[in-house]
Image (cartoon, rainbow, N blue to C red):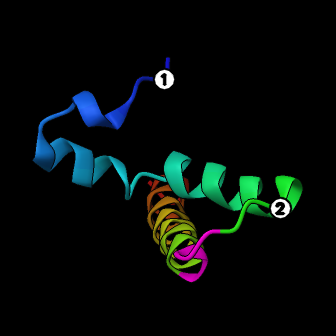
């Protein structure tokens, strides 16, 4: 379910911008529809941070479970 972030409290609206769905949709919109985005590098950086952190956390958790 999607809803406008303008209806959220300011703290949650700011937090929602750093969840992976918002930067992913803006990046895909840029590449497939040609919509220019001044924050494209920031969007890609957020996605890269999510990729690195989620990979590191999952590697740690699955490695720990494999040996116990």
**Label of residue 34 in the image:** 2
| Residue 57 or residue 40, whichever sits in front | 40
**Label of residue 30 in the image:** none
Q: Position of residue 27 (x, y in %)?
A: 68, 61
| Residue 15 or residue 57, whichever sits in front | 15
Categorize mark 1 by other alpha carbons within 10 Å: few (<14), some (14-19), many (20+). Answer: few
Q: Residue reaching furthest top?
A: 1
Q: Position of residue 67 (x, y in %)?
A: 51, 60
Q: Position of residue 24 (x, y in %)?
A: 63, 55
**In the rendered picture of this protein, how many numbered marks are placed on residues?**
2
Quarter residue 66 falls in: bottom right
Magenta span: predominant SS is loop
At 55% across and 58% down in the image, what residue appears? Answer: 23
Q: Give the number of the mark in front: 1 or 2.
A: 2
User: Residue 35 colored magenta?
Assistant: no
| Residue 67 or residue 44, whichever sits in front | 44
Categorize mark 2 by other alpha carbons within 10 Å: few (<14), some (14-19), many (20+). Answer: few
Q: What residue does disc 1 label?
A: 2
Q: Residue reaching furthest right?
A: 32
Boundaries of the magenta span:
37-41
Residue 29 vertical placement versus 48 (above, below) = above
At 45% across and 70% down in the image, what residue appears? Answer: 53
- Pick whichever of labels 1 and 2 is earlier in the sequence: 1
Helix, strand or loop status at disc 1: loop
| Quadrant location, the C terminus | bottom left
At 87% across and 55% down in the image, what residue appears? Answer: 32
Instruction: For marks 1 and 2, give the CA distance.
Output: 22 Å
Q: Is residue 68 left or right of residue 26?
A: left
| Residue 5 or residue 59, whichever sits in front | 5
């Amino acid at each position: 379910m999607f809803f406008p972030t303008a209806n959220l409290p300011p703290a949650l609206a700011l937090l929602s911008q750093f969840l992976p769905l918002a930067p992913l949709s803006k990046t895909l919109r840029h590449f497939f529809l040609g919509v220019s985005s001044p924050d494209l590098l920031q969007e890609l950086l957020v996605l890269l941070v999510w990729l690195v952190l989620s990979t590191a956390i999952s590697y740690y958790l699955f490695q720990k479970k494999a040996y116990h």
